[in-house]
Amino acid sequence: MEFGWNDEQRGFRERVRSFIDEHWTSAARRRSELEPWQRAREYQKRLAEAGWLTMAWPQEYGGAGASYFEQLIFAEESSYASAPTGGQGADRVGPTLIIHGTEEQRREHLPKIARAEVDWCQGYSEPGSGSDLASLQTRAVRDGDDFVINGQKIWTSGAQHADWIHVLTRTDPAAPKHRGISYFMVPMSTPGISLRPIVQLHGAAGFNETFFEDVRVPARNMIGEENRGWYVSTTTLDFERSGIHRIAAALRPFRRLLAHAQRPDGAGEGRRIADDPTHRRALADTATEIEVGRLLGYRVTWMQARRLVPNMESSMSKMFGSETQQRLARRGVNMLGLYGNLRPGEERAPLGGEFCNYYMSSVSLTIAAGTSEIQRNIIASRGLGLPRG
Ligand SMILES: Cc1cc2nc3c(=O)[nH]c(=O)nc-3n(C[C@H](O)[C@H](O)[C@H](O)COP(=O)(O)OP(=O)(O)OC[C@H]3O[C@@H](n4cnc5c(N)ncnc54)[C@H](O)[C@@H]3O)c2cc1C
């Protein structure tokens, strides 16, 4: 196996870095009056203009026909810089429509996603159905050329800014649970949809409860066949779980922590970390874990490039990437001592309070996109051939 990058790929990485620096990192300083979601939207428009928002899509649908490895380089550099990528539309709905959508659906939705004109959110989880998603209860009932949806979703990230939702519903309550689900695309402006924000530990309100009350959606907005929506949604979930971004996002805080411990003045906080054998070992473990996680991510891309379907491999990468981030965040706040609990903006917060926020937000990483327990179940049953527990 060749672990290096060729000249073309190295050149592409450089171009991505300078693009991110100009349009995201420096632009964020210039446009500090914007809300984070507005900045993300503006940036996605720049990405769309550069042809990078949907770079691996076929050209006929607004993509650039880029290789999987170019997409990986782009995702790696973006996550390192905490810059947005495609989001629900470009990274989940679009690729799902390319595989399972009708030609009419592709022509209607893909160009708008590729031009960053629309934002999507995901209506899967319900108060009683998270890990056991196939038990979902939101009902869709046929009425002429439409379906009428009633029920509730939860943890709908970014629904307050979204134009569309992709939503799983039960269309045949008598069928075995996986076989009575249908998958719809619904404009968020449809009468009958309402939201209630959920405020998180660190104060942001990124999630929502989403209520559907007699929401009418045309039957042509169904993705895939009626009652076969579960099998379409597993494609969407594979896209959600694969990706180098989790491990790439760990690299920057790790480097910042390491630089703090390496400070040449040899005094104060950094020296206390560098001299402590437990902290030294924890830093060495993290460096190793980041390398392992990176290779797990590259393996997924390598399989995709060979038209293999990474399933257990996506789960391994997802689980290891999110758990590595959590361990790093926990190690970071431990190393920084009591001051490590100070938040951004507090005078004595080490590293600008970054690790306090990282610690709190990392709690959710092993839950989002399927918990670590569920990933382990997938690895054990689909990957290792063990009987279902
Ligand atoms: C940051 C974030 C963003 C999210 N965004 C969205 C979104 O946009 N749209 C959306 O639809 N959902 C979203 N979710 C919801 C997410 O998909 C669910 O939280 C997740 O699937 C787990 O479901 P649950 O919270 O109901 O937990 P539960 O399923 O109730 O699980 C509780 C605990 O039981 C364990 N468990 C459950 N079943 C098993 C089993 N069979 N074997 C072993 N252990 C088990 C779980 O691992 C977990 O530890 C988001 C979640 C987070 C944290």
Image (spheres, helix red, strand yellow):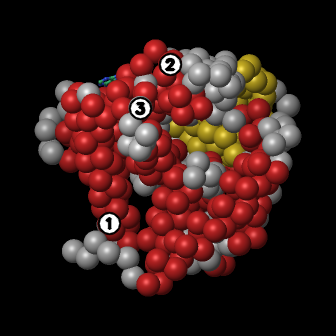
Labels 2 and 1: the sequence-earlier one: 1
Q: Which residue corresponds to mark 2?
A: 339
Q: Which residue corresponds to mark 3?
A: 267
Q: Which residue corresponds to mark 1?
A: 303
Which image quadrant for residue 51?
Answer: bottom right
Amino acid type of disc 1? Met
- The N terminus is located in which quarter? bottom left
Q: Is mark 2 within 8 Å of ligand 1?
A: no
How far apart, in angstroms, are the residues tagged by discs 3 and 2? 16 Å
Badge 3 crowding class, 10 Å Cα cut-off, few under 14, some 14 to 19, many 20 or more, is few
Residue 276 percent location from the top left of the image? 26, 28
Labels 3 and 2: the sequence-earlier one: 3
Q: Residue at x 50, y 18 (%)?
A: 339
Q: Is residue 15 above or below residue 156?
A: below
Residue 296 percent location from the top left of the image? 30, 54
Between 48 and 146, the residue placed more toward the observer is: 48
Compared across the picture, whether 192 is left or right of 287 comes to right
Camera-near label (3 vs 2) is 3
Q: Is residue 113 above or below residue 376?
A: below
Does dot 1 land on a helix, a strand or a loop? helix
- The C terminus is located in which quarter? top left
Residue 279 percent location from the top left of the image? 28, 30
Q: Residue at x 66, y 67 (%)?
A: 19
Camera-near label (3 vs 1) is 3
